Image (cartoon, rainbow, N blue to C red):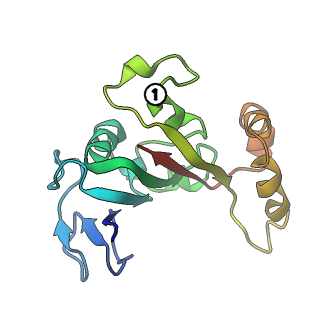
């Protein structure tokens, strides 16, 4: 059976997972601030790490390095963070960072930026990388825009470098890295 970690779980408790949060809430298995490194886990302990709405609240590079440490070879980390165009990126005063769909490419071995020397850890590949748009009856165009923008990398680039991203702001990014 695979061992899974739910980082910064808050009240999103997952049965059968190790639920980690800095607050002692019902269902939290490990109370620990993720910026207090190293995390209280052994090297290569987890097969899967779920990190939803967490990394924007911290100095994420050291945290990502330690999550890499506790992730087994071939393991995956799912990350959900605000896109840099998201209105909510700037509403929450605890947000320290916003992200582009290309941000996590810097953490790949032999990355396209040619800057894999920036970090002393690397992931093998990205298995999932989507720009997410808020869906509501007031924003009907987002139902069409999201699959279109995510259909090819060149459209993600076009979206982020043009005024299109300001006319139709994204909401989040979902990225899955494979160690």
Where is residue 46 drawn, in percent x and y?
29, 58
Is residue 29 shown to the viewer in this render?
yes
Q: Is residue 100 left or right of residue 107?
A: right
Where is residue 57 drawn, in percent x and y?
37, 50
Decide: is 85 above or below 137: above
The residue lying at 64 percent from left, 45 percent from top is 85
- In-front residue for pair 17/147: 17
Q: Is residue 110 left or right of residue 1?
A: right
The residue lying at 38 percent from left, 20 percent from top is 118
Is residue 95 shown to the viewer in this render?
no
The residue lying at 61 percent from left, 51 percent from top is 86
Q: SS for tag 1? A: loop
- In-front residue for pair 173/89: 173
Q: Which residue is mark 1?
A: 109
Residue placed farthest to the front in the image? 1
Where is residue 151 drawn, in percent x and y?
79, 48
Where is residue 1 drawn, in percent x and y?
33, 71
**Looking at the figure, which quarter contains the C terminus?**
top left
* The quarter of the displayed image where residue 19 is located: bottom left
Q: Give the number of marks.
A: 1
10 Å crowding of disc 1: few (<14), some (14-19), many (20+)? some
The residue lying at 26 percent from left, 66 percent from top is 20
Decide: is 17 above or below 15: above
């Amino acid at each position: 059976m695979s061992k899974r970690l739910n980082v910064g779980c808050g009240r999103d408790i997952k049965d059968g997972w190790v639920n980690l949060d800095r607050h002692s809430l019902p269902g939290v298995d490990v109370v620990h601030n993720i910026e207090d490194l190293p995390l209280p886990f052994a090297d290569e302990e987890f097969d899967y790490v779920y990190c939803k709405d967490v990394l924007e609240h911290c100095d994420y590079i050291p945290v990502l390095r330690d999550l890499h440490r506790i992730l087994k070879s071939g393991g995956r980390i799912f990350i959900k963070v605000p896109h840099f165009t998201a209105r909510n990126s700037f509403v929450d005063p605890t947000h320290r960072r916003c992200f582009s769909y290309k941000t996590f490419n810097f953490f790949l071995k032999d990355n396209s930026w040619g800057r894999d020397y920036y970090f002393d850890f690397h992931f093998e590949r990205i298995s999932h990388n989507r720009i997410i748009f808020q869906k509501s009856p007031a924003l009907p165009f987002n139902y069409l825009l999201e699959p279109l923008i995510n259909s090819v990398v060149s459209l993600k680039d076009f979206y982020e470098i043009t005024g299109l991203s300001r006319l139709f702001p994204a909401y989040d990014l979902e990225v899955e890295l494979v160690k």
